[in-house]
Image: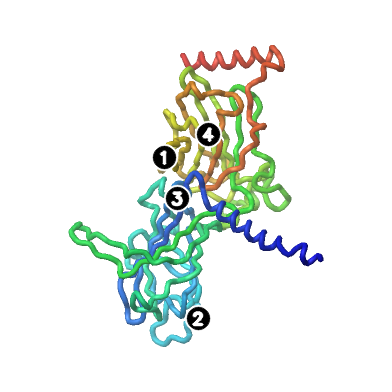
Amino acid sequence: MMFYKFAYPLPMVAFFAIIISQAGAYDPLDPNGNITIKWDVMSWTPDGYVAVVTMTNFQMYRHIMSPGWTLGWVWAKKEVIWSMVGAQATEQGDCSKFKGNVPHCCKKNPTVVDLLPGVPYNQQIANCCKGGVVSSWGQDSSTAVSSFQVSVGRAGTSNKTVNLPLNFTLLGPGLGYTCSGAKKVPSTVFLTPDGRRKTQALMTWNVTCTYNQILASRYPSCCVSMSSFYNSTITPCPSCSCGCQNNNNCISGDAEIESVVGKNRTRSRNSNAMIRCTNHMCPIRVHWHVKLNYKEYWRVKMTVTNFNYAMNYTQWTLVAQHPNLDNITQVFSFEYKPLLPYKYTNDTGMFYGLKFYNDVLKEAGADGNVQSELILRKDMSTFTFKQGWAFPRKIYFNGDECAMPGPEEYPYLPNSANSKLSTMASFLLLVFANLLGMI
């Protein structure tokens, strides 16, 4: 009888796991965001083809930071890579069967990485050699592309005999991406530099990779704290937002920081043990402070703090969702771009650093933060300081959604029902803030 009691849960668990995975890959603030990998066969060779592989990041606010992307696949048959330009396979594999010319890679499942900047010109093609760093489409579409050329041997030599690679994987630079199978699409059309002639690839196929934060990590990678001018209470990040503290996963005192971190440390992908010990244990904290209230405007200060001693965040992005972002008047120290995932909704914006000024969020320490202030125009039909309205609905850092305090934790206006004193204090605070706005 026990066998029949547990006959159904396993298929049901698998079903719900698939549903959750697919739901996690859908980002409501960037519903069309993905990384598209396009293979254009440019010429046939005696035993295969030469293809240009182009990776385009169509995600509005999720970029690929250093140490860059890693792309993998499995050959359908016994293909080899004779040569590459603009990228390299991380392992050559067993090429002992070849006499004379030895392939660049003989592995059944090659893993490819971008070349570093400064390689010789004969090893470069357009949009290569950036160390795998790819901007988000919303931040800079001109640098949201990465390309390389690959010469494939022991493969088909026509559109009918080529076998598409299988089981694509993408690290960007860590886990989180799931890739579709390769799909043949209409051949890419190219325009000559003078604009007078069109050419096209001999064959083209696409692979689409989408990001799922649940696959990337079991915990968030950032959290949000809050404060306001009308309440002295500071709402901290929720405890254990990004995991809980133990003796081995963080750095506490200054002496430990100096001994463990040092000046010439090596940086690795797994830098969790280099995070400052906090109650929230997040490498990134975003603080939203409701700073001032004017007659027709109100002012917010945002501070992003890095608690990771082993990582600088280059080309960082911050996304905020708030109903008053449809009427933002001025942004200080950050670049700002509204995100319009839906035609009639303008409540989401992307912030990022000014180039060569604060586009790098430095490692934890005195300089490990960036700040901005926003001035927003009030819509008197909706504006209020009550019930946490002045605080964001969602915050994302580098494309990952941050852990938010519960609504009951938000700084609140003093309740007039508690005492006459709190009523008078609240009134005086608001009057004084309005007077400041009129000066």
Q: Is residue 143 left or right of residue 409?
A: left
Q: Tell me which amino acid carries mark 2.
A: Asp
Give the residue number, with chain letter if any, for mark 4: 302
Q: Earlier in the sequence, mark 4 or mark 2?
A: 2
Q: Earlier in the sequence, mark 2 or mark 3?
A: 3
Local packing at callout 2 (Cα closer than 10 Å; few below 14, some 14-19, many 20+) is few
Asked if 331 appears above or below 141 in the picture, the reply is above
**Secondary-structure class at tag 2:** loop
> How much space separates mark 1 and mark 2, taking CA atoms?
54 Å
* Quarter residue 359 falls in: top left
Give the residue number, with chain letter if any, for mark 3: 32
**Secondary-structure class at tag 3:** loop
Asked if 333 appears above or below 214 in the picture, the reply is above
Give the residue number, with chain letter if any, for mark 1: 343
Residue 349: where, in percent of width, then height?
46, 38
Q: Are marks 1 and 4 in contact (CB under 8 Å)?
A: no
Q: Are marks 3 and 1 in contact (CB under 8 Å)?
A: no
Q: Earlier in the sequence, mark 1 or mark 2?
A: 2
Image quarter (top left, top right, bottom left or bottom right) of the N terminus = bottom right
Residue 78: where, in percent of width, then height?
46, 80
Q: Tell me which amino acid carries mark 3.
A: Asn
Q: Tell me which amino acid carries mark 4.
A: Met
> How much space separates mark 4 and mark 2, taking CA atoms?
54 Å
Q: Earlier in the sequence, mark 1 or mark 4?
A: 4
**Secondary-structure class at tag 4:** strand
Question: What residue lies at 55% left-to-right and 42% top-to-bottom?
Answer: 368
Kindly report which numbered mark, 1 or 2, lies closer to the viewer in this rendering.
Answer: 1
| Disc number for residue 94 | 2
